[in-house]
Amino acid sequence: MSITTENEIIGMQRASDAVAITLKKMREYAKPGISTKELDEYGGELLATFGAFSAPALTYQFPGYTCISINGEVAHGMPSAGKILKDGDLVNIDVSAELNGYWADNGGSFVLGQDIYGHGKLVETSKEILKKAISNVKGGVRISEIGKLIETEAKKAGYTVIKNLTGHGVGRSLHEEPHEIANYYDRYNTERFKKNSVVAIETFISTRSTIAETQADGWTLTGNKGGFVAQHEHTIMVTSAEPMIFTAGNRIWD
């Protein structure tokens, strides 16, 4: 969407606060021994306190309030009573929701408990790349240049990017124009960021894979070459200077 009024800013901020605070509290609630279903139901309760509705459930009939992916899962992990969190797991939570006609999206990967498997560097790299990418988003900047930045920074750190998962426009629905804000340099994409537009910028930084593939459950994505992936995401408004980060309340950069 393109923001034209103060009321639209307020509406986007309220929806963004709902998903950001839900993500933050779910991250704090996660602990070894609980299932991803229990964590997801907690997230659903939090969204309800804001009067917000799960975006993946509304849009795609996803079987959960949030997407929770662990270890080798890249994205769209289905909450399950059989998936029990363990110390050292690489966990990704993606929370998106609708509130009073406004839609917001955010996500973050983290290591649960002690970093016994060495996922911490991947997580920190993803965070820093997202921060650098967002700081370079301005009206008039080519979308492909942000993809180039993300891919270049990932390579410098010894990682790859997932090429078929992208950021996107958001605001009046979950996915809007621009439909693809890729994590790599797509020389065929000549689109530019538009001032006052609302977009979700997200990283998919991988230890090995470059493509996410759908598994037998029809939802869960894993990497084509295995390994692990860290994702971090903010909903922002593009300006002529520093973007406005609507989902800053998730504190994923802390």
Image (tube, rainbow, N blue to C red):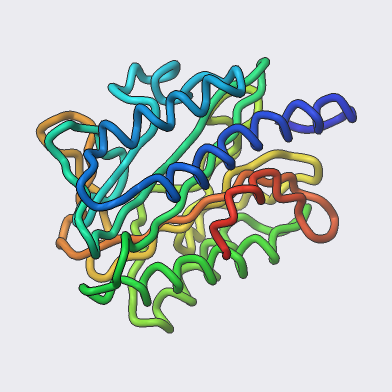
Residue 252 falls in image quadrant = bottom right
In the depicted structure, whether residue 75 falls above or below residue 60: below
In the depicted structure, whether residue 230 falls above or below residue 11: below
The N terminus - image quarter = top right
Left or right, residue 12 beside residue 97: right
- The answer to whether residue 82 shows anywhere in this view is yes
Residue positioned 16% across, 41% down in the render: 83
- The answer to whether residue 145 shows anywhere in this view is no
Q: Compare residues 215 and 121 and report the one nearer the observer.
A: 121
The C terminus - image quarter = bottom right
Percent x, y of residue 223: 21, 55
Residue positioned 66% across, 23% down in the render: 102
Residue 90 falls in image quadrant = bottom left
In the depicted structure, whether residue 146 falls above or below residue 25: below
Percent x, y of residue 208: 23, 69
Residue positioned 35% across, 27% down in the render: 41
Percent x, y of residue 116: 22, 74
Disc tally is 0
Left or right, residue 14 beside residue 186: right
Percent x, y of residue 200: 58, 44
Q: Compare residues 220 and 95 and report the one nearer the observer.
A: 95
Left or right, residue 65 beside residue 174: left
